[in-house]
């Protein structure tokens, strides 16, 4: 079988820029926030875990650092900041996170089988990705379009055999 009949050339920069301009709505960086989170999983009595979460919040409110309280109360003993992107978590979790101002801390809230206390470190609104930021996605999109066109043009030539019978893809 001649696989080269369906092969396409790599896209040129002009093809990719044209594709980007025509499909800009596909290339957005979602709204996101960088946070620290204290997570207390509900493994036994929900009331006991809620009490422990409120105790942790009280310690922070009385002046202890978020980091120190996290070490004592959170399921994860290592406190790492991470990004939360809109549309990737539960609605309640995202509502709480995105309602916070930078350096603001949430009250205790429940999401799934855990209680959380979250501190917002940084926020970024939804924004258009630049051509350079979206380059890999753009290249994949152009290649896919070119492959589809090539297949349509050459589908009758793309044949294969099974047990001696010829088929056209």
Image (cartoon, rainbow, N blue to C red):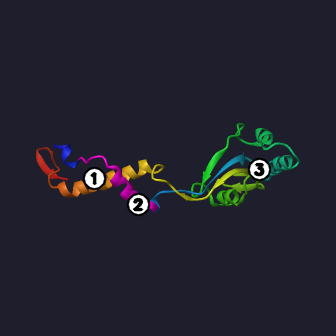
Earlier along the polypeptide chain: callout 2 or callout 1? 2
- Gap between marks 2 and 3 measured at Cα: 55 Å
Residue 15 painted magenta = yes
Q: Secondary structure at mark 3?
A: loop
Q: Which residue occupies the extreme right position in the image?
A: 62
What residue is at 25 percent from the left and 48 percent from the top? 8
Q: For residue 21, which numbered disc appears in the image? A: 2
* Part of the protein shown in magenta: 7-24
Residue contact between numbered discs 2 and 1, judged by CB atoms under 8 Å: no
What residue is at 22 percent from the left and 49 percent from the top? 6
Q: Which residue is mark 3?
A: 45
Residue 89, by quadrant, is: bottom right
Q: The N terminus is located in which quarter?
A: top left
Q: For residue 147, which numbered disc appears in the image? A: 1
Earlier along the polypeptide chain: callout 3 or callout 1? 3
**52, 117: nearer the viewer:** 117
Q: Secondary structure at mark 2?
A: helix
Residue 113 visible: no
Count neighbours of disc 3 (C-alpha within 10 A) and say few if under 14, some if 14 to 19, many if 20 or more: few
As displayed, is residue 149 above or below residue 6? below
């Amino acid at each position: 079988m001649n696989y080269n009949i369906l092969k396409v050339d790599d896209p040129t920069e002009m093809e990719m820029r044209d594709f980007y301009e025509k499909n800009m709505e596909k290339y957005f960086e979602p709204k996101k926030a960088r946070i620290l989170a204290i997570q207390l999983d509900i493994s036994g009595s929900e009331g006991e875990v809620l009490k422990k979460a409120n105790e942790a919040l009280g310690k922070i409110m009385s002046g202890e650092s978020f980091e120190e309280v996290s070490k004592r109360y959170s399921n994860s003993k290592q406190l790492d900041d991470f990004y939360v992107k809109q549309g990737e978590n539960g609605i309640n979790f995202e509502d709480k996170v995105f309602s916070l101002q930078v350096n603001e801390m949430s009250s205790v809230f429940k999401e799934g089988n855990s209680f959380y206390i979250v501190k917002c470190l940084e926020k970024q609104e939804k924004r258009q990705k630049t051509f350079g930021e979206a380059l890999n996605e753009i290249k994949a999109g152009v290649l896919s379009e070119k492959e589809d066109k090539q297949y349509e043009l050459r589908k009758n030539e793309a044949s294969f055999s099974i047990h001696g019978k010829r088929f056209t893809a």
